[in-house]
Image (cartoon, coloured by chain):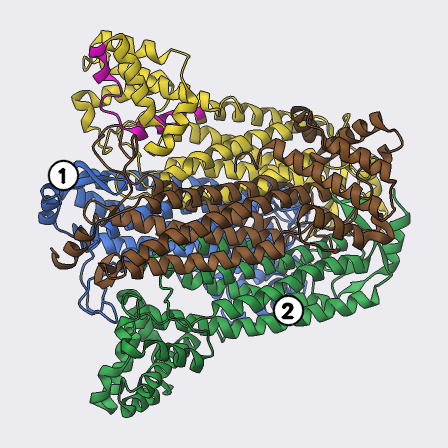
Chain colours: A yellow, B blue, C green, D brown
Amino acid sequence: MEALFSDDAELRFMLAFESALAAAQASVGDIPASAAETIQGCCAETDWDITWLKTQTLLAGNPAIPFVDQLRQRVRQKDPEAAPFVHRGATSQDVIDTALVCQLSQALTTIRADLDELINLLTSLKQVHQHTPIMGRTLLQQALPITFSDKLTGWLSGLFRSAERLDRVSQECLVVQLGGPVGNGQSFGEHYTSICEQVAATLGLGFTTTSWHTQRDRLTDLASTLGILNGSLGKLANDIILLMQTEVGEVREGAAKGKGGSSSMPHKRNPVTSTFMVAIAHRTPGLVASLLSAMNQPHERAAGAWHSEWSVIRELVKLTAANLHHSNDLIRTLEVDTDRMQQNLTTQP
Amino acid sequence: MEALFSDDAELRFMLAFESALAAAQASVGDIPASAAETIQGCCAETDWDITWLKTQTLLAGNPAIPFVDQLRQRVRQKDPEAAPFVHRGATSQDVIDTALVCQLSQALTTIRADLDELINLLTSLKQVHQHTPIMGRTLLQQALPITFSDKLTGWLSGLFRSAERLDRVSQECLVVQLGGPVGNGQSFGEHYTSICEQVAATLGLGFTTTSWHTQRDRLTDLASTLGILNGSLGKLANDIILLMQTEVGEVREGAAKGKGGSSSMPHKRNPVTSTFMVAIAHRTPGLVASLLSAMNQPHERAAGAWHSEWSVIRELVKLTAANLHHSNDLIRTLEVDTDRMQQNLTTQP
Amino acid sequence: MEALFSDDAELRFMLAFESALAAAQASVGDIPASAAETIQGCCAETDWDITWLKTQTLLAGNPAIPFVDQLRQRVRQKDPEAAPFVHRGATSQDVIDTALVCQLSQALTTIRADLDELINLLTSLKQVHQHTPIMGRTLLQQALPITFSDKLTGWLSGLFRSAERLDRVSQECLVVQLGGPVGNGQSFGEHYTSICEQVAATLGLGFTTTSWHTQRDRLTDLASTLGILNGSLGKLANDIILLMQTEVGEVREGAAKGKGGSSSMPHKRNPVTSTFMVAIAHRTPGLVASLLSAMNQPHERAAGAWHSEWSVIRELVKLTAANLHHSNDLIRTLEVDTDRMQQNLTTQP
Amino acid sequence: MEALFSDDAELRFMLAFESALAAAQASVGDIPASAAETIQGCCAETDWDITWLKTQTLLAGNPAIPFVDQLRQRVRQKDPEAAPFVHRGATSQDVIDTALVCQLSQALTTIRADLDELINLLTSLKQVHQHTPIMGRTLLQQALPITFSDKLTGWLSGLFRSAERLDRVSQECLVVQLGGPVGNGQSFGEHYTSICEQVAATLGLGFTTTSWHTQRDRLTDLASTLGILNGSLGKLANDIILLMQTEVGEVREGAAKGKGGSSSMPHKRNPVTSTFMVAIAHRTPGLVASLLSAMNQPHERAAGAWHSEWSVIRELVKLTAANLHHSNDLIRTLEVDTDRMQQNLTTQP
């Protein structure tokens, strides 16, 4: 996930966009085939100077401007006549948003697979503990016995729904951005629809001819979906921390060398993985709120709100991936103390 | 909307739940038909003392406890043998959550209809201004001309998606809560599924046999959906405020007696309705974040996080309804100054 | 606190502002003494129609416009020549913000006193339990013994600092608003400073001649201070809920008729007061964030961000007052089970 | 600022803590002077393996555990008898929190200086434009003329207060953490106060003997203070963006090679620096809310809430520093178009 969200990966997706755009425009006859070939060749080059791009971003206001400049220069060196066809009809936000969506698409694939794994791990555990009794607790008071399977059913129910939500937002929200300078697609001429279709197909994204430069609902829908998943994972992790309390002791995180000690009390077995999960769940609501606030994007391009999304959505996705990674570790090695569960049912103080 | 979210309405929905539950349990033979009749009769009474209920809530921790006490007492006065069958198998959270979902269901129906009206108003406006040129603006700088219809297409696109999202969450999230004391439905006995089905059907809600006492993802999904809708409305309103600037002057809020003046400068035409809309959009992200944070609900019933939802989700729904109401007022009476739009295209300073 | 934040109370504070302003302007000779007397007389009348004012607010955009209209009309009926001197030089935001600050001032006085009471209650408890041993717990694992007094020292330390912060913000943030239509005081003429001083003195507020129509840092400072206090109270309440767990059982909320039961399990002693406290602490961060977001107020008066503060700051203050009220109930009647504390030190499973 | 928040810098501050602790304990006779010397020597070494530390953090739950292990090992190699005196009496949270406070302290020094510079730049600009007329605007409508100096007075007023707040929180919140395993200082023995004093003095921090392991109000106070500053900067930046609108044109960001163009319309002068500022101001409320939520830290050490602070507070500080850096760039090179200001006063459409 770190690699996917590196500056280098972002650049690769921006290059993929320009390459796909040139190919699409050549196929409909809007630019010469030879120009498209040259552009695609330059987009495949591997010696880009990321540090320079990052520096220029601060001056230009976004990474697309110095990026397109550099691409055009590279193309010009190979074929001066091809240079004007670079990024033709497109605007900064087209390449930046589409590159973001490509990143999100890859990240969601990983997240979806990790969620499936978590669901499988919990389902297996549920089968094992179909009849394991455990005290049900309301307002943190002992109430009536349930089964550990009941508890797992609860955790799973939210995760099943999150899996469906992820499938839905992957379908609805991972859509190409291609609107041109003022978002209405006019700059792409009469073949606009066809160009949109081809660029989307090449990049494996959904297709639209209504650009979303300042309509950010899809992005916040995706963000909320991740926020909700993290909420469910946080609840699961917090339940485990509560069950691990010395006085309850019904489950334990799996032991590992160097894991879960304390610098002053090395004998203790602490919740470690579930602690990281709770920490992530604490951070995600603020990130979702930040994106909801940023929906107020004026006119045809925002001056700030759009820019505020860049780090926030990526942080949210990385945290979600980490949370699932931790979850799978946690459940895979979870130690269930059925004796203690039984004991807590009968020996109330 | 105020009436729908009054204390009285909440009580009515709680009574509807108990009534539906007794009927369902009688129909499967779990309680005597006569008991169900008595219970349903008491649930139809209109002389409940809401003030007393509210006072007792602070002692009991939730409104359901004094409410069920009072219902049982009323039933006992009519038929002592029926009293034990009141609220049978159910827990406080069953009646409180289900009553909430009933409220949300009615509110969403209104919200959905108001959104349709807004979409219709904007669609009509779009047809009128298919060819009305207006300056496109990026980063609040004049860029290239677009049509006013392009701008309306943008606003509409997000609203169409919000309409679809509302339909989806109405389908997925408006689900009956019926889990009993520790959420696993055991207290309802062998006819649990049938009881759930009937209660849901009577109340017009979706059906599940997996209770969601501490799995709050459906509620946050609904909340996020409202948050996103408010985000789109806030963008629309802010665009109008920007277009209304004295120096731009391309649209105006409709005039009305007493509207939009200033106490010190009565001649001014101020944005009023759009200002209220922006104000609402400022408030909703924090409410959504609050509900996302509250997903961390321990074990089988939360001690605080659940309780924090009660006001927040209702406030969010009321604000959304108000925002749509303002939107429809705004668009219905919006004055479009096509001359000024034309003028701004040509006379740049 | 409900009374303090009623519509009627808001109106009273608005009347107090206009009354103070007229008096100050008369004292410096800017308006006739007789006009000031008439205005002050009308401001003391008690037959204002609040429902009408609320309706007009939606048209006018804020409550000050219809309010000033009505005041001017009342004055005109008594003395036509006095009417032009109503609200002279002032703008809507002057009266609305100053009335808000008056409300906040009264609310903070109550909050400060309740916090003192809480500190006293905790200090007394600390003296009793100077040497009561209790298990210290880190990451919810038993660690090493501490005293219950140590725990109380922790809770108290944050509250002492909150008390100091409240004193500071009361000093710094409760400041009169008096800027006129564009905030620079010009409309008040040469006696501006003196008028500000007198209005502030009459209303018991701090004094400034730099209006803060769109500089909202004082208000967010006050809001953050309340947010932090609620955070400390939430921690305290959550600690008590954890200590009340059946498996820990070291403290209990005091018993009261009708308190802390469950509709399905009437024998249980649930955390009730601490649950309400945790619920409040869940809601406050979103409210503070909402006010921080609303600091982006354009030019000399905001179109939405300002308006979004009205409910949010009031809700935050009311929740804080309720939280302290609950806190005092909780600590006053808290039952400390020193036997169980001792027992948990020695009998680890 | 990037260097200050690097992993390497964090390690340096952790080493500084252990070094200061050993020195203090030697000075009061709790550990041998020779052991302290060896520990200090090892703390001054420069060949630490940060990558290994980061990996181990995931297993151990926090960076302090592998760090202290490694330090103890290094000390043991030089003097086996000194090893037990490493980190003596301290707990992970002592070193992690104190290292954080050291970072914050250095960062606040820079932030404070940059804020002073901004205040100076704005004050100079104000002197130049003492009598420059500009239209005052309320609800984004032209209202009455003010001076550009009035506008600068507004911006400055909030910043002056932020400067005072920064001074206050630097005094109150930058406090050493030294509580030992369960926070009550017992593990440090009879010289606890003296050890606290010396460690604080060595590190240039404030001093307390009441540890704040789970009392996080100081940290949220500092965070809110930064949040408020960013709110004021966001307002300033947004005002400039509004004044830069093509139709208003009263100020312009300074020109620079490669700055402010658009990839599709290279002739445009866009707001760039102010856009970044607004973007930052959009992100900070969610971060402050996250820290407020994280105040709910159970018992003597939190399992998740504490850990959630680590990235969030650092991100907030880095964003604040960046915001001020941008502010100074913006104001230093701001072009003020007094002709256009004059023109907008007279030629209303």
Residue name at image x 44 percent, y 59 percent: D160
Location of residue D142 in the rendering, given as x and y in whole percent from the top left corner: 21, 59
Looking at the image, how many numbered discs can be counted on the residues? 2
Residue B239, above or below B333: above
Q: Which of the two discs, 1 and 2, sits closer to the camera?
A: 2
Instruction: Measure the alpha-carbon separation of dots 1 and 2.
Output: 62 Å
Residue A88, magenta (yes or no): yes
Three-letter code for the amino acid on which mark 2 is drawn: Leu
In terms of secondary structure, where does tag 1 sit? Answer: loop
Is residue B117 visible in the rendered image? The answer is no
Residue C74 lies in what quarter of the image?
A: bottom left
Frontmost residue, B187 versus A173: A173
User: Left or right: where does residue C165 sit relative to residue D330?
Assistant: right
Residue C149 marker:
none
Residue D120, magenta (yes or no): no
Location of residue C292 in the rendering, given as x and y in whole percent from the top left corner: 45, 54
Three-letter code for the amino acid on which mark 1 is drawn: Gln
Residue B269 lies in what quarter of the image?
A: bottom left
- Badge 1 crowding class, 10 Å Cα cut-off, few under 14, some 14 to 19, many 20 or more, is few
Residue B130 marker:
1
Q: Which residues are magenta?
A: A80-103
| Circle 2 residue | C115
Frontmost residue, A321 versus D232: D232
